[in-house]
Image: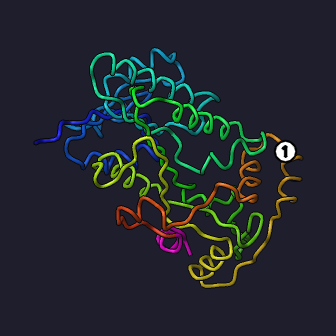
Amino acid sequence: MTKSTQSTLLLGAGELGSAILTPLSAYPNIKITVAVRDPSRYASLESEKTSFIALGLTDLTIQELATAFAPFDIIISCSGFGMPTGSQMKIAEAALAAGKQRVADGKQAISFFPWQWGVDYDITGDANGTMELFGEQLNIRNLLRAQSAYSGMNWTIVSTGIFMSFLFEPYWGFVEPEGEDVVVRALGSWENRVTVSTVEDIGSIAARIVCASESELETKDKIVYMAGETISYARLAKVVEIVFGKKVRRELWSVDHLREELKKDPENLVKKYRVVFAEGNGVSWDEKGTVNRTLGMQVTDVETWARENLKV
């Protein structure tokens, strides 16, 4: 029997949305609609399988979004950074309302992939009240888990860790050039670990999960984990030495030091993140249990990424 075409709504065409769009469009029986503010910017990307529509996620009510979502079998949320507080919960509630409408109309349940491409919010919580977005993400998980099997929605959360490139963005503080030298900093301790994935690997694995059969992979109403690499700060320093071919200066930022820095600048989001990673809860997991291992998919590790992307 030929598998019917699955209509997919991709929310956003930024770095993550674009990374998912390319591999997803290569699968048969997938027709993709990408929701953006200005479709005219993406005219060159339209094809027989891919179209763009205008949709202001922050402008519409939950019911208006639900009406827009209801025609689609699959909804993948890739709009997150920079959106106002409460936006992710609104999208989740709209997807749920759309699923209920579909069931009432005799259609199949919606498969929903929320914008949870990051750390394990069940463990981080709201980071002792400092991370409002983290708290919202945990509330979304609880909302999804509270739904019955007849709610009209099947959900999958893909925990990816942070983008691998973030390790080398100076403003995060992990790896930073200092004149002719390079400093590598450990947040909390040198043994602390962080899970990282390239955006390209996230895109490929997300597309594979969306299109996998239940016999290949069971992800319905589950949280699954992927990892390009789960790396300690000690290993990160060694990788930087290998790639640059010289000794790096190692610096430890303790939890206490980072908390004091945050007290001086309590609204600084980067400093909030640094404390979370220094505390080390929910920001890493074992590579053995990842979905990429289960599917036998090759991923990029930190050393490979650094060799291919850093100017030495």
* Mark 1 closeness class: few <14, some 14–19, many ≥20 residues within 10 Å: few
Q: Main secondary structure of the magenta part?
A: helix
Against 55, is 230 above or below? below
Q: Which residues are magenta?
A: 302-312
How many numbered badges does the structure rendering display? Answer: 1
Say which of 100 and 262 sits in front: 100
On screen, residue 57 versus residue 125, left or right, reads left
- Looking at this rendering, what residue extends furthest in the left direction? 1
Say which of 179 and 228 sits in front: 228
On screen, residue 197 versus residue 292, left or right, reads right
Amino acid bearing label 1: Asp
170 within the magenta span? no
Q: Going 63% across and 73% down the picture, which residue do you hit?
A: 236
Q: Going 43% across and 34% down the picture, which residue do you hit?
A: 11
On screen, residue 168 versus residue 216, left or right, reads right
For the C terminus, the image quarter is: bottom right
